[in-house]
Amino acid sequence: MGFLDNLKKRLAVFGIAALCFGYFAAYVPYSMMTKMLTKGLFSGMGGVGFSGFEIQPVVIFASSLSMFLFLTFSGWWKYATHSKVLGISIPRPQWFTLISGICTSGQIITTTLAYTFEGVSIVFAMLLMRGGVLVLAPIVDLVAVRRKRKIYWPSWVAAILSFSALTVALFGKVGTSMTVVAICDISLYLFVYFFRLFFMSNRAKSDDVEEKKRYFTEEQMVANLFLFAALFVVGLVGAQMSAESIPGKIWEGFTLFPFKGHTLQAFLIGVFSYGTGLFGSLIFLDKRENTFTVPANRSASIIAGVIATYLLAIFYGQRLPPAHELIGVVLIIGAIAFLAYRSAMDRKLKRQEAGSRRQEVGSGKQEARSKK
């Protein structure tokens, strides 16, 4: 635990910037490997990839295992709500972390699927998903009345720039190649994200560290286990259906895909997927308004998506991002600049408050001595 405590102290110095870097570092291999596995770019695949639904069982299993290992080695299981069953203390969710966890499970699977659709680039999918959530962020801040937060002007500017990036992306020709399944996938992603942010804002965004850890542990516990169980049930239904149907492909993911020689790549996608979920959730749980934390999270993933796209183009001959997508990225970088200014405002305010408290304490001591 000495190493973990030391690591926590070092990361605390960088605050949300360290979480954004962790999110970015996990997102590059996650998005890149997902595209490679579904387009057949790994060695020995010969350009024949797997269906996005087919790889899900292994990906979600790896994500669930990563979740269990992190919560175990970090010791965070103790923060979850517990109930006794036959004399054994079992961690369980509260009603709001149960709903938030189910929403998170929808976010996990729709994110991975978004990078598997033919004709939709990593950057374009990111601009749609991330831009959409950025639009939702100030709405959540306005409707989350349980813990109302003031939205500062740099956060508004960052959200507007991010929305502009989404608008620019939608003018690209690639948007016309989106299938009905892709549109439904991204729509579901935005739908579940709204409710996840809403419950986080009302129940967990505060200075209480234990409250944050409790929320995170319960939410992640529900998300991964619920998603894996749901996939298995759908797969069982798919066993009686055509192999070309979505349930049929999921069943093949359980029964055939693990023996086709690319299980390790899918497993690593799941590990990196959990990495994005870990760092991303901790960013969202920052006590500041969603109009600040959401752009911070989304900006890191947009930059990661651009880097992954360029790596695919350089090493695997995939297409480079078109001009309209790069313009969207530039707008996102502009949003980051305003977020950095917002962070500087916070640090300045904290220094002023600390100085005022020291001055009050000093005045109180001086007054006490004069009375003597």
Image (cartoon, helix red, strand yellow):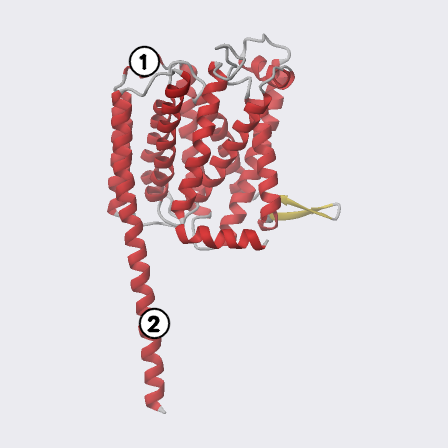
**Amino acid type, residue under disc 1 in the picture:** Thr
Depth check: give the residue in front, 304 or 341: 304
Asked if marks 2 and 1 touch (Cβ < 8 Å), the reply is: no
**Amino acid type, residue under disc 2 in the picture:** Arg
Q: Position of residue 328 (x, y in %)?
A: 27, 28
Q: Which mark is residue 364?
A: none
User: Residue at position x 53%, y 12% from top?
Assistant: 45
Give the residue at mark 1. 176
- Label 2's element? helix
Indicate left or right for 300 with 263 as reference: left
Camera-near label (2 vs 1) is: 2
Q: Residue furthest bottom?
A: 372
User: Residue at position x 32%, y 42% from top?
Assistant: 291
> How busy is the neighbourhood of tag 2: few (under 14 within 10 Å), some, or many (20 plus)?
few
Q: Gap between marks 2 and 1, in whole Å?
A: 61 Å
Examine the rendered structure and indicate whether residue 255 appears above or below residue 31: above
Placement of the C terminus among the 4 image quadrants: bottom left
Give the residue at mark 2. 358
Indicate left or right for 172 with 76 as reference: left
Lower position in the chain sequence, tag 2 or tag 1: 1
User: Residue at position x 59%, y 21% from top?
Assistant: 263
Q: Position of residue 298 (x, y in %)?
A: 36, 35
Q: Position of residue 360 (x, y in %)?
A: 32, 74
Depth check: give the residue in front, 262 or 364: 262
> How busy is the neighbourhood of tag 1: few (under 14 within 10 Å), some, or many (20 plus)?
few
